[in-house]
């Protein structure tokens, strides 16, 4: 019998293993192709959903990196697949203009039929209020219990538990520590971080997660428009090559250690550290870092010459050994669940 949750999305395919997350989203395989700046191009999002998972739109990646009008980008995805898709709403209000743009993007996505949203970096209440008017679903990125409780106070339906093996803004706790920390909150939990192989995926589901969010694994796919040197770096790296840098956004971000990173370093300078300690000045410093990194990451991710080795990735690289089509990747994960079910 299916677990009952509010705001269910119509099931498109019979799930290989029903979890609260597949019930919420109507997908077949409990896998999220996580939103990635700068790697989430529309074709990658569509491919993940077509293969039975859930592709998530990252609006800045879609518009700024890959050059699509936001509404037209969604229409492009819809021309490839009619399966459920989602959107990531970064809800930090450090810039009024950016917040207004994010509100516009959320409204367009709802107008185009998107009914699943992942919120990050702030209070999700305004997104929840908009999405619930359309009977949609909202999950929230968290790295520890206090942020989970704030997200639940904001009305979210589930939590993306970002652990210490994740790419991008990694958490401080392990996969099991987060499960223990959040497991009593009575909402679906998604494991985000360290899932680079089908064995790691099925292990997380057996532990009690309702699904997994993969980012780095989907960079090394044929549908991802990241440059070949970036994809090959993901394939070649092992988890010891993943380091944390606070020179990108002002908080630690997981990146691949390369000669370029050795040259520029991973620690913020003395002035930046002083700025980041102040309640008011930290927002200015983070904004400076954010604007600079937006341009750097776009350039490096599309650079086929590989001259700027500035690439985000998580410790799941240890389980990634080749560039493959998205359908092949998700098919292997689905088969692993099927064998566990048997």
Image: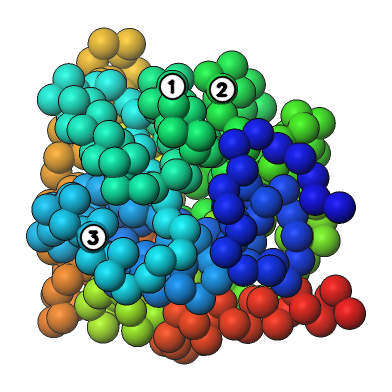
Residue 125, position as x, y percentages in the image: 45, 20
Q: Is residue 184 above or below residue 2?
A: above
**Could you tell me which residue is drawn at 61 percent across and 27 percent down?**
148
Of pointers 2 and 1, the one earlier in the residue sequence: 1
**Could you tell me which residue is drawn at 61 percent across and 23 percent down?**
152
Quadrant of the image containing the C terminus: bottom right
Q: Are marks 2 and 1 in contact (CB under 8 Å)?
A: yes
The circle on residue 155 is: 2
Q: Are marks 2 and 3 in contact (CB under 8 Å)?
A: no
Q: Nearer the viewer, residue 101 or 129?
A: 129
Residue 329, position as x, y percentages in the image: 53, 81
Which of discs 2 and 3 lies nearer the camera? The answer is 3
The residue pinned by badge 3 equals 75
Q: Is residue 4 above or below residue 43?
A: above
Q: Are marks 1 and 3 in contact (CB under 8 Å)?
A: no
Q: Is residue 32 visible?
A: yes
**Could you tell me which residue is drawn at 72 percent across and 71 percent down?**
16
| Mark 2 to mark 3 CA distance (whole Å) | 29 Å
The residue pinned by badge 1 equals 129
Of pointers 2 and 3, the one earlier in the residue sequence: 3
| Mark 1 to mark 3 CA distance (whole Å) | 24 Å
């Amino acid at each position: 019998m299916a677990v009952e949750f509010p705001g269910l999305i119509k099931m498109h395919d019979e799930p290989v293993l029903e979890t609260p997350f597949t019930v919420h989203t109507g997908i077949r395989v409990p896998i999220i192709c996580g939103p990635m700046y700068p790697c989430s191009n529309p074709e990658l999002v569509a491919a993940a959903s077509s293969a039975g998972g859930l592709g998530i739109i990252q609006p800045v990646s879609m518009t700024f990196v890959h050059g699509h009008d936001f509404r037209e980008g969604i229409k492009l995805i819809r021309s490839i697949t009619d399966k459920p898709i989602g959107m990531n709403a970064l809800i930090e209000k450090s810039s009024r203009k950016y917040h207004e743009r994010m509100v516009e993007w959320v409204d367009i996505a709802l107008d185009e039929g998107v009914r699943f949203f992942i919120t990050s970096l702030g209070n999700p209440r305004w997104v929840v209020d908009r999405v619930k008017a359309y009977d949609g679903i909202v999950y929230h990125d968290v790295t520890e219990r206090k942020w989970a409780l704030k997200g639940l106070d904001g009305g979210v339906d589930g939590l993306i538990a970002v652990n210490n093996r994740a790419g991008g803004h990694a958490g401080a706790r392990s996969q099991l520590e987060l499960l223990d920390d959040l497991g009593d909150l009575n909402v679906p939990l998604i494991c985000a971080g360290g899932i680079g192989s089908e064995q790691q995926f099925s292990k997380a589901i057996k532990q009690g997660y309702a699904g997994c969010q993969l980012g780095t694994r989907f960079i090394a796919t044929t549908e991802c428009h990241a440059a070949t040197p970036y994809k090959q770096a993901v394939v070649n790296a092992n988890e010891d090559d993943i380091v944390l840098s606070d020179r990108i956004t002002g908080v630690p971000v997981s990146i691949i250690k390369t000669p370029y990173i050795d040259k520029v370093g991973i620690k913020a300078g003395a002035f930046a550290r002083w700025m980041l300690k102040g309640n008011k000045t930290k927002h200015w410093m983070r904004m400076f870092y954010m604007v600079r990194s937006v341009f750097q990451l776009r350039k490096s991710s599309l650079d086929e010459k590989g001259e700027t080795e500035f690439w985000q990735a998580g410790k799941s690289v240890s389980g990634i050994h080749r560039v493959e089509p998205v359908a092949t990747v998700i098919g292997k994960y689905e088969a692993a669940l099927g064998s566990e079910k048997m």
